[in-house]
Amino acid sequence: MSKIRFEAIVKSANRDLITIQEHGRRSEQFGTKVFNEDRMLQYLTKDALESVKGAIFSGSKIDRKIADQVAEAMKAWAISAGATHYTHWFQPLTGTTAEKHDAFFDLLPDGRALEKFGGGQLVQQEPDASSFPSGGIRNTFEARGYTAWDPTSSAFIYGTTLCIPTIFVSYTGEALDNKAPLLRALHAVDESATAVAKYFDKNVSKVNATLGWEQEYFLIDKALAHSRPDILMTGRTLVGHQAAKGQQLDDHYFGVIPSRVLSFMGDLEQECTKLGIPVKTRHNEVAPNQFELAPVFEEANLAVDHNLLLMDVMEKVADKHAFKVLFHEKPFAGINGSGKHNNWSLATNTGVNLLSPGSTPMKNLQFLTFFINTIKAVDTYEELLRSSIASASNDHRLGANEAPPAIMSIFIGSQLSRVLDELEGVSQGKLSPEEKTELKLNVVGKIPEILLDNTDRNRTSPFAFTGNKFEIRGVGSKTNCAKPMTILNTIVAKQLKAFKKEVDALIDKKNLKKDEAIFNILREYIKASKRIRFDGDGYSVEWEKEAKRRKLSNNRNTPEALQILTSKDSLALFKTMKVMSEVEVAARQEVELEAYIFHTQIEGRVFNELVYNYIVPAAIGYQNTLIKNVMGLKDIYGAAHKKLSDGQLSIIEQIAEHISEVKKKADAMTQARKRANGLKDINKRAKAYCENVKPHFDEIRYHCDKLEQLIDNSVWPLTKYRELLFIK
Ligand code: ADP
Ligand code: MG
């Protein structure tokens, strides 16, 4: 056994349990590291507090004097809580977060030292973060990037640093990050949804999109993770034969959480609680060593920030517990990968969930309005929504019969399907009094409240209605939720805006009553968006055929899925909803394609290393042992050795065959990679990586895994699945 593998296994097996800290009462610790309303009340004047709250509620500007006050208050609080530095915390297009710390410490001209932080530093910074991907925006505009305070997401202290959530934009105003477009999309959906919600309640003046994510992840012992170059470099195992036991016994799912893991979770939850991340649920997932964590849902922008922060906190806490967290969507072959369901809804300032069926016909008409408009939006822009969850690593999941297929469809369950069918039968134009009663009392009025405990869930559906929210199931575990949230909220905003216009036109021109007009339009939408509704098995081959007949997109890989971003319709959508300009969209497409290429390229390189420096040498070593053995037998037994060395000779030959094949495939892959790299056009390059490079990966793996089965365990250099996957 290689030294590194041996030592890692010993280390992992002898880990002491890092005992669970005294955790105390959660509610008392909640948000203690956050500059939230409680802190502001304590540190700000009434005017300043009102101004910040106004900015949060309506996006109003905070003037410089107030910003100075807020900065002074933040500084006082942060320093009293032990912070020494501050940073603008932002989300470059790499998909993660970035920070550049500055000390509060400063010197006066006379050499005296002090702690300094003013409105200027709070509101805007120029991190000169010129190495982040910008999809050519910087080059085109020769603009530097700057970060600007997002007062809707509270500042927090992380370690000894005050972190201020910010957007990251170029001087000419183009968003260089994932947060700015999200904020614009949330603003758009607020505007459109508020206007529609007013049909039902004049008091509604704001609608927030809500997001509750469910984060899946794997935990691996740190020493074991470090013993494998593929896990370190790519976040997943490129080779590895399946362990004899996988998830077939279903004994991990919701099972007893191992004590080492529980101890990690306890510390993690405490840290999250202090940072204001309202974590609530934890459990084992389907695959061995796979777990899930879910919070109470929040306003979408805050929830996105919290998910990004969580992923960072997880890595740090895991490290303390000698674990490595794997967020990759498919770290191990043969067992489930990880996703991040995005539960989404719309909430009014009056405390109503617009996707919650109500107890009266009017409330249910409101519910149906938002429900059906969402369905219509997804139907119109299904391909765009699919594009928002595309990535090299998520390609391993989508359509792989464990996660939703790459085809978008909506599951609403049989009860709501029946309601929509009945609504579809509404006659056109004015309704007779009987029709009205029939509709209101018998159709809309009876949407059963038991929907809330809708157990009738279809796990194969990529977009499912689950009682009082929709759930996007295809989001990858690594993905920044800002991406799907930007698209979903933009398309719903666009749809609601069109709906309002159509309803108003019917009221004005055809002299219909409001609810009649609404019924009329909803009926048309139900008809028009029928193809997106599918309650059957999303994994089946029949569905794939049926989806094709329905003209639904089925983009199985990232380069294909990303094309739709720059279609005429998509660009028009982003522009009219003021979410992204053409330049910004094109930049994102380029950055995503580039990321796809780089990730695949890195995997290709690591494959070569594994083949040439690990697997082939180990195989040859063992083969030599066998050869020596056969020669020894020949020395002793002469011609009679043949019968005795039968088995050895067969293994020698099998090893030779796999070595030859694995080398051939690895070399072919390298050639394909070189050819791909030579392509100037980024679309062609991404396509070449997808179609000509990546297919070799499975072939190489096949032979490597065969060799793993043939070769003496004690000389195999790579930590095996059974060693990686079963934490005690
Ligand atoms: P699942 O059965 O999919 O595992 P869970 O109960 O684990 O469902 O997760 C439900 C998630 O939905 C939680 O993260 C919760 O916060 C979120 N959620 C519940 N209601 C809403 C809502 N109105 N808007 C957004 N998210 C919600
Ligand atoms: Mg879920």
Image (cartoon, rainbow, N blue to C red):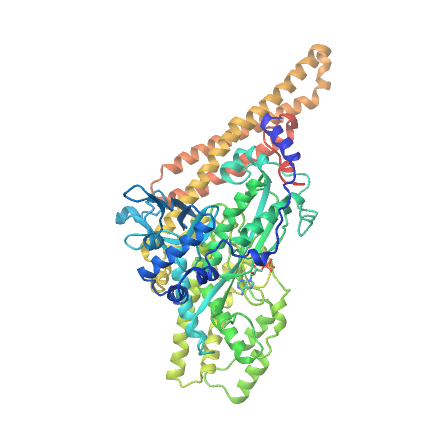
Q: Nearer the viewer, residue 673 or 598?
A: 598
Coordinates of residue 479 in the picture (x, y in percent): 48, 50
Quadrant location of the C terminus? top right
> Residue drawn at (39%, 57%), measured in percent from left and top?
150
- Whether 440 is drawn above or below 369: the answer is below
Displayed quadrant of residue 3:
top right
Image-based side of 623 in relation to 302, left or right: right
Q: Residue at x 63, y 39 (%)?
A: 242
Q: From this viewpoint, is residue 94 visible? A: no
In terms of depth relative to the viewer, which is nearer, 65 or 260?
A: 65
| 696 over 254 or under it: above or below | above
375 or 552, nearer to the observer = 375
Q: Position of residue 123 (x, y in %)?
A: 34, 55
Q: Is residue 673 left or right of residue 6?
A: left
Q: Is residue 537 above or below residue 92?
A: below
Query: What is the quadrant of the N terminus in the image?
Result: top right
Number of callouts in the render? 0
Give residue 329's position: percent from left, percent from top: 53, 47
Seen from the viewer's position, the closer of residues 405 and 361 is 361
Q: Is residue 421 visible?
A: yes
| Above or below: residue 629 compared with residue 677 | above
Image position, residue 446 (x, y; %): 60, 78
- Name of the residue lying farthest toward the bottom: 433
Q: Residue at x 56, y 77 (%)?
A: 422
